Amino acid sequence: MTYMMTRNNDNYLDNFFDDMFCNWGVRNSSYPAVNVYEDSKAFYLEASLPGYTTEDVNINIDKHVLHISSEKVAQKDERKYIVRERSNMKFDRAFSLPEGINEESIEAEFKNGILTVTLPKLPVREPKKITVKVSA
């Protein structure tokens, strides 16, 4: 039995050349998939990491860049797969942090395959007003 997987894609030719010349077998830089949102207190980054554990994932900050990475690779498996889309692989995602982040208070939580990184905002500092004295 043969299965053919298709995906909706508007630009097959561009994707063919992107896959052929850019990636060279390396997973593209958008893995894992993330959502980033904010509220008045913080920015939040959620990464989908099914099959990973807290021990598999590394998070660090270097020069205002947040790195999320893993060295985990898929285990060799004797099963004969018909379709295999899920796998674990090593990755490294980097995110430039905006100004106004309290880097000392960044927290991360891993729950149900979702890594949530909380990036608290620093309090907004109002510009200091300087009074100009007029001399006679």
Image: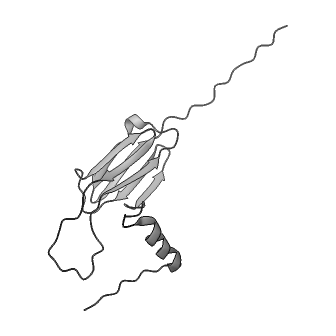
From the image, which quarter does the C terminus lie in? top right
Relative vertical location of residue 29 with respect to residue 98 in this rendering, above or below: below
Residue 124 lies left or right of residue 112; in this view the side is right
Extreme left residue here? 78
Extreme bottom residue here? 1
Extreme top residue here? 136
* Residue 42 image point, x, y percent: 45, 44
* Residue 123 image point, x, y percent: 51, 34
* Residue 86 image point, x, y percent: 28, 70
Residue 105 lies left or right of residue 10; in this view the side is left
Q: How many marks?
A: 0
In the figure, residue 81 lies in which quadrant? bottom left
Q: Residue at x 33, y 54 (%)?
A: 115
Q: In this view of the protein, which residue sits in the foreground, 8 or 75?
A: 75
* Residue 111 image point, x, y percent: 27, 55
Q: How is the image coloured?
A: one colour
Q: In this view of the protein, which residue sits in the foreground, 46 or 131?
A: 46
Q: Residue at x 46, y 68 (%)?
A: 21
Residue 59 lies left or right of residue 79; in this view the side is right
Relative vertical location of residue 98 with respect to residue 127 in this rendering, above or below: below
